Image (cartoon, grey):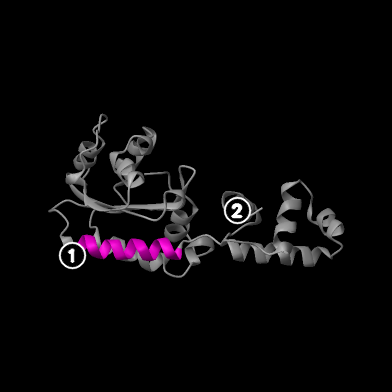
Amino acid sequence: MWRDNETYETLHKGPASGDARRPGLEEGFDALARISPKGFSAGLHIRFASPMIYMRTYDEEWTKIYDENAYALRDPLVFWGLGGKGSTRWSAIRLPDPFNILGQARDHGLTYGAVVSHGPISSRTIVGIARDDREFTDEEIADTVKIVIDLHSAAAPPTELTRAQKEALRLLADGDRHTAAAAKLGISESAFKARLQSARVRLGARTTAQALKKAREYQLL
């Protein structure tokens, strides 16, 4: 599906922080890994054609081909997931695949798979799982559905910021530096930084720039 984001990098290349610290995410991804021998892809809370959190463990050669050809825009699994909610095996999907994406996936070991779609269309979660030896059983797919529901819940974005957090982020968005922003608010620079820190925690962001980006994406400003 989509390109890897900071959550993928955090979980695999560094200490847990930001989104990766959210309760349930690492546990959910670990559970998906156990159930899918050939990897998985998970786009959580897809909004405006982009997931807020993305994790992928498929074959690296295949993911490179997938990304270079922008297959996320052509993938029948993505179309199926956006078209409705539920779960199905890849082999049961009858949507057009003019670029033979599923066939190419099989050539890279993703022979059998299932897809789960959950959540409202305005914030959809789509997860694909794969293996190379047999079809997933009904029980395995049911277990995956439960995992996806938990991941969707764990990754739910905040619904609001405090007035102080909004003011601090808006001033930075307008181009003010910390000193100038603090002066406009009539507070000390350390107090201003504390507001930014609380906003980062609230948004699950590692940096203020990431917090500002997320606040915009979540339409909280």
Labelled disc at residue 139: 1
Q: Is residue 146 magenta?
A: yes
Using the image as rendered, state which of residue 142 and residue 208 is in the foreground: 142
Please tell me whether the stretch drawn in magenta is mainly helix, strand or loop. Answer: helix
Q: Amino acid at mark 2?
A: Gln
Q: Is residue 35 magenta?
A: no
Quarter containing the N terminus: top left
Question: Badge 2 is on which residue?
Answer: 210
> What is the magenta range?
140-154
The residue drawn where x is 73% and y is 67% is 194
Report the side of 132 relative to 14 (left or right).
Answer: left
* Mark closest to the chain's N terminus, 2 or 1: 1
Residue 117 in view: yes
- In the rendered image, residue 116, in percent from the top left (x then y), is placed at 29, 54
Circle 1 packing at 10 Å, graded few (<14), some (14-19), many (20+), is few
Q: Secondary structure at mark 1?
A: helix
Q: Amino acid at mark 1?
A: Glu
Q: Which residue of the protein is positioned furthest toward the left in this rendering?
A: 134
The residue drawn where x is 38% and y is 66% is 150
The residue drawn where x is 49% and y is 43% is 48
